[in-house]
Image (cartoon, helix red, strand yellow):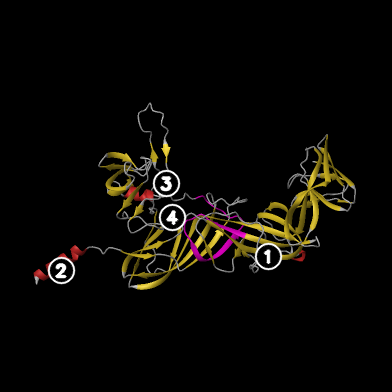
C-alpha cells in the first residue's frame, strides 16, 4: 500500500503543469474595414507614406482544446497596433496577448541561420556551370552576408557572378504572415466564433469630385469617388468598407519594427587601400529560397487614379452621423488589394444648379495692378439647392460635353463642406473681368473691378481673413464663411469701385 501511494505521489510531482496547446487561425471568415483619413491629407496618395489608419474587425471560427491554449491569429494587418486589439468570444477570456514581429524574409532567414550550414550555388568562372557546396553563415544580414566555405571567408554576391543560398528548413519562430497570439483557457473542447478588433496604420482615403456641366450651362451632374489606399502587404477579401470624414483626437503611437532589418548585400573594394576600386552595391537577393517552402513576394503596381469616371454605379447610401464625424458606407463587399488602391462610389447627384461667379481673394495693403479673376461655379450645399449632403474634402474636376467628348474646364480642391455651406468648383481664369487695388494712407484701400464681357457678371471678393474687421464706405459688406465679402454685379462693359478701411 505504501509503495502504491509513493508511486502515485511521484507521478503527480513528475507530471508538472500541462503545456499550453497551440491553435492556429489562418485567416478570418469575414472582415470589416473602417478607414480614417490623415489629419491633413490632400493631393495624390503616396503608398510609401500613409498617415491615416483603419479599425479592422475580423470574425473567425476557432477550435479550442480543453485546458490552456495559445491561439495564433495569422494574417492580421502588418500595421496592427497590438495594445488596441480586443478579442471577444473566448469563453476563458484573454490571459496574455503578443504580437510576433519575426516575419519570414530573406534577412530573417539569414539571421535565424547564423552559425549553421546552407547550400551555396554559384557559377564556376572557368566552366560557366553551376556548382553547389556547403557553406556556413558567419555574419549577416547587414551590411552583408559573410560565408565560410572550403576556400575561406567570403561575402555573398561579391564575385560578380550569380550566387544563391538554399536553406533546408525555416528557423523556428518565423512566420510568413503577421501574427497576433493570445493565451486563453477553456473548460472543454469546443468551436467558438471569435471577433478580433484592432487599429492598424498603413491606410488612408481621399475624395475626388467630378462635375459634368449640362448643356444649359446652369447645372451639372456631380459624382464623387472614394479612393481607398492600403499600404499593408495583406489582402482583405470581401471586406465591408466604411470611411470616416472629419477630425478626431489622435495620439501618435510608435509602430512596431521588424525584428530583423532588411537584407543588404554590400561588397567592399577588392585589392589594397591604394586601389581606386569603387564600392559596389547589388540588388536585394530574391533567389534566397527555402526547400519546400517559399513566400511569394509580390509588388502591386500603383496606377494613377482616373479623374474622369466610367458609367457611374448605383448611388451609395447617404452618410450617417458618427458624433461630429460622418460615416460613409460602401453598400457592397469589396476586396482591398495589398499595397494598392481601390476606387468606390461615394456620391451621385444629378442636375445640381449653380451660379457662375468671378472671384479673387483680396489682401489689405497689397497693391494689385489689373489682375485676372478666377471663374468659379458656386452653390449652396442645401437640399433646396439640389444638394444638401456633407461633402468631405477632396480634389475637384470640372468637365463640359461637346458632342461625344468630355472636355476638361478646370481642376481644384475643397475643404470639408457641411450642409448649409457654400461649395465652389474652379472653372478657369478670366481676363475679361479684371481687378485692381490701390493702397492709401491710414490703412485705407480702393478696390475696383471692370467687366469687358458683353453680358452681366456676378463678382465676389473676400477681403482679409475670417475675423478681420473690414469697414466699407457706402454699401455694406456681406459676411460669407466668416469673411467680409464684396459681391458687386457688373453690367456689360461696367465698372464698380469699393473704398474700405482695414
State which quadrant residue 228 falls in: bottom right
Mark in the foreground, 4 or 1: 4
Task: Identify the magenta region.
Answer: 226-252
Does residue 342 lie above or below 474 as drawn?
below
Quarter that holds the C terminus: top right
**Distance between mark 4 and mark 2 Cα atoms:** 55 Å
Horizontal side of residue 41 vs 440, given as left or right = left
Residue 180 can be seen, yes or no: yes
Mark in the foreground, 1 or 2: 1
Label 1 with label 3: CB-CB less than 8 Å: no
Mark in the foreground, 4 or 2: 4
Mark closer to the chain start, 4 or 2? 2
Q: How many circles with numbers are drawn on the protein?
A: 4
| Residue 308 drawn at (x, y percent) | 67, 58
Label disc, if present, on residue 297 of the rendered structure:
4
Residue at 20% of width from left, 64% of height from top?
15
Label 4 with label 2: CB-CB less than 8 Å: no
Does residue 33 lie above or below 126 as drawn?
below
Mark closer to the chain start, 1 or 3? 3
Residue on which the image places disc 1: 348
Label 4 with label 3: CB-CB less than 8 Å: no
Residue on which the image places disc 2: 8
**Distance between mark 4 and mark 1 Cα atoms:** 38 Å
**Distance between mark 1 and mark 2 Cα atoms:** 77 Å
Mark closer to the chain start, 2 or 3? 2
6 or 197, nearer to the observer: 197
| Residue 355 drawn at (x, y percent) | 80, 57
Mark in the foreground, 1 or 3: 3
Q: Residues within 10 Å of mark 1 (few under 14, many from 20)?
A: many
Amino acid at each position: 500500500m505504501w509503495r502504491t501511494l509513493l508511486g502515485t505521489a511521484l507521478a503527480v510531482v513528475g507530471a508538472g503543469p500541462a503545456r499550453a496547446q497551440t491553435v492556429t487561425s489562418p485567416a478570418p471568415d469575414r472582415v470589416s474595414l473602417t478607414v480614417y483619413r490623415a489629419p491633413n491629407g490632400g493631393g495624390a496618395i503616396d503608398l510609401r507614406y500613409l498617415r491615416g489608419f483603419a479599425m479592422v474587425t475580423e470574425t473567425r471560427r476557432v477550435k479550442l482544446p480543453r485546458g490552456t491554449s495559445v491561439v495564433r491569429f495569422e494574417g492580421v494587418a502588418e500595421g496592427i497596433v497590438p495594445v488596441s486589439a480586443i478579442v471577444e468570444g473566448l469563453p476563458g477570456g484573454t490571459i496574455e496577448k503578443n504580437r510576433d514581429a519575426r516575419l519570414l524574409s530573406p534577412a530573417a532567414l539569414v539571421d535565424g541561420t547564423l552559425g549553421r550550414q546552407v547550400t551555396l550555388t554559384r557559377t564556376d568562372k572557368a566552366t560557366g556551370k553551376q556548382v553547389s557546396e556547403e557553406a556556413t553563415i558567419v555574419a549577416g544580414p547587414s551590411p552583408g552576408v559573410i560565408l565560410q566555405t572550403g576556400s575561406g571567408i567570403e561575402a555573398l554576391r561579391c564575385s560578380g557572378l550569380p550566387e544563391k543560398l538554399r536553406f533546408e528548413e525555416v528557423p523556428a519562430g518565423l512566420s510568413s504572415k503577421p501574427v497576433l497570439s493570445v493565451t486563453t483557457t477553456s473548460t472543454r473542447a469546443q468551436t467558438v466564433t471569435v471577433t478580433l478588433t484592432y487599429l492598424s496604420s498603413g491606410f488612408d482615403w481621399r475624395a475626388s469630385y467630378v462635375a459634368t456641366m449640362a448643356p444649359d450651362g446652369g447645372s451639372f451632374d456631380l459624382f464623387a469617388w472614394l479612393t481607398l489606399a492600403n499600404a499593408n502587404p495583406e489582402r482583405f477579401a470581401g471586406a465591408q468598407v466604411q470611411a470616416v470624414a472629419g477630425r478626431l483626437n489622435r495620439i501618435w503611437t510608435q509602430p512596431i519594427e521588424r525584428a530583423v532589418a532588411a537584407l543588404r548585400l554590400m561588397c567592399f573594394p577588392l585589392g589594397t587601400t591604394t586601389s581606386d576600386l569603387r564600392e559596389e552595391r547589388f540588388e536585394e537577393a530574391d533567389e534566397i529560397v527555402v526547400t519546400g517552402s517559399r513566400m511569394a513576394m509580390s509588388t502591386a503596381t500603383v496606377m494613377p487614379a482616373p479623374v474622369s469616371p466610367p458609367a457611374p454605379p448605383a448611388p451609395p447610401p447617404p452618410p450617417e452621423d458618427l458624433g461630429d464625424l460622418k460615416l460613409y458606407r460602401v453598400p457592397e463587399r469589396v476586396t482591398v488589394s495589398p499595397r494598392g488602391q481601390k476606387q468606390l462610389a461615394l456620391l451621385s447627384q444629378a442636375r445640381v444648379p449653380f451660379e457662375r461667379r468671378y472671384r479673387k481673394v483680396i489682401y489689405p495693403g497689397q497693391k494689385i495692378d489689373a489682375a485676372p479673376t478666377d471663374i468659379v461655379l458656386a452653390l449652396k450645399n442645401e437640399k433646396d439647392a439640389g444638394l444638401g449632403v456633407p461633402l468631405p474634402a477632396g480634389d475637384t474636376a470640372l468637365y463640359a460635353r461637346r458632342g461625344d467628348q468630355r472636355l476638361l474646364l478646370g481642376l481644384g480642391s475643397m475643404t470639408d463642406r457641411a450642409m448649409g455651406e457654400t461649395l465652389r468648383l474652379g472653372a478657369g481664369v478670366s481676363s475679361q473681368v479684371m481687378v485692381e487695388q490701390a493702397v492709401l494712407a491710414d490703412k485705407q484701400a480702393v478696390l475696383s473691378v471692370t467687366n469687358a464681357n458683353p453680358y452681366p457678371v456676378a463678382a465676389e471678393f473676400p477681403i482679409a481673413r475670417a475675423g478681420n474687421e473690414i469697414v466699407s464706405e457706402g454699401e455694406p459688406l456681406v459676411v460669407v464663411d466668416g469673411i467680409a465679402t464684396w459681391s458687386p454685379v457688373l453690367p456689360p462693359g461696367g465698372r464698380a469701385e469699393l473704398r474700405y478701411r482695414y
